[in-house]
């Protein structure tokens, strides 16, 4: 059984002899990430129109392939193809309708594949750019998914997808993307608002996973 203990404010999972576990540490300053988030939110505030049209904002995604914008709100999912001047609501099947759409992750190879974290329906997935949706929660320990991230940096490793589940910790899918597996409790501050895979060498063949929390930014090398 895997256990965790806190030392000096960091979460340090116990290390089984069979493998090395990730270690979360606090990162004091990531200027580029903070600037990008601030710019996205300020631009949205200027172009999205009256707040009563869409409800309050939880998540924003800029597609790198076509520049389209996606937002997750209290009232649903919306997409814009004209830099936020107009928004179209994305149709979600009634059985998957959620109270809040909390987070996005886009497949780094196929931009039509999009993952969405919800407040009460776990994770959803579309493989055709939003025309059809399905539940994508097999293996998740809960239905409140506040953060998602996809790693597209390391071609020598299996595809990786991450999910932060409130009160349950960090989950990950490797390779065939069929079932989530729990990784650990995550950073010492459990109020995770966003996840981001960042292509910074760990020295062990992996990437760093960053978590934005209400007490700052934490990171962990994800190498195994």
Image (cartoon, helix red, strand yellow):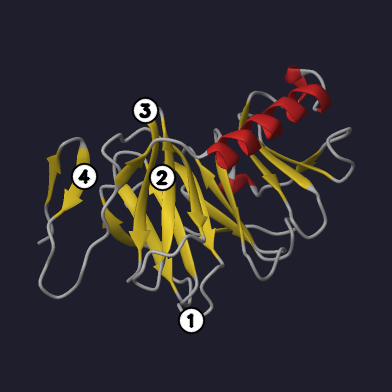
Using the image, determine if residue 20 lies above or below residue 94. Answer: below
The earlier-in-sequence mark between 1 and 4 is 4
Which class describes the residues within 10 Å of circle 1: few (<14), some (14-19), or many (20+)? few
Disc 3 marks which residue?
215
Q: Quadrant of the N terminus?
A: bottom left
Considering only order in the chain, which callout, 2 or 4, is on the residue closer to the N terminus? 4
The mark closer to the camera, 4 or 2, is 4
Mark-to-mark CA distance, 2 and 1: 31 Å
First-in-chain label (2 vs 1): 2
Residue 80: give x, y in percent of width and height: 82, 42
Residue at the spot 30% in from the left edge and 59% down from the top edge: 182
Residue at (30% x, 45% y) in the render: 25
The one nearer the camera, 26 or 60, is 26
User: On the image, numbered disc 4 is attached to which residue?
Assistant: 11
Residue shown at 48% from the left, 81% from the top: 156
Q: CA distance from mark 3 to mark 4?
A: 14 Å
Q: CA distance from mark 1 to mark 3?
A: 34 Å
Between residue 184 and residue 152, name the one nearer to us.
152
Outermost residue toward the bottom? 156
Q: Earlier in the sequence, mark 1 or mark 3?
A: 1
Residue assigned mark 1: 156
Name the spot of residue 153 as percent of width and height, x first. Answer: 55, 68
């Amino acid at each position: 059984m895997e256990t965790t203990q806190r030392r000096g404010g960091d979460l340090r999972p116990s290390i089984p002899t069979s493998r090395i576990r990730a270690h979360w540490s606090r990162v004091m300053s990531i200027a580029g990430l903070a600037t990008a988030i601030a710019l996205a939110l300020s631009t949205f505030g200027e172009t999205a129109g009256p707040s009563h049209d869409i409800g309050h904002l939880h998540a924003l995604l800029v597609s790198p392939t076509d520049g389209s914008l996606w937002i997750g709100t209290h009232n649903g999912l919306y997409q814009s193809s004209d830099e936020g001047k107009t928004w179209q609501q994305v149709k979600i099947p009634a059985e998957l309708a959620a109270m809040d759409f909390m987070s996005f992750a886009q497949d780094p190879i196929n931009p039509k594949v999009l993952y969405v974290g919800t407040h009460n329906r776990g994770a959803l997935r579309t493989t055709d750019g939003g025309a059809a949706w399905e539940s994508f929660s097999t293996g998740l320990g809960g239905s409140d998914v506040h953060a998602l991230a996809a790693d597209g940096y390391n071609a020598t490793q299996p595809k990786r997808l991450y999910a932060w589940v409130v009160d349950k910790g960090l989950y990950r899918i490797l390779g065939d993307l069929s079932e989530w597996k729990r990784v650990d409790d995550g950073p010492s501050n459990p109020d995770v608002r966003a996840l981001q895979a960042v292509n910074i060498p760990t020295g062990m063949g992996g990437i760093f996973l960053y978590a934005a929390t209400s007490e700052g930014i934490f990171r962990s090398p994800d190498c195994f």
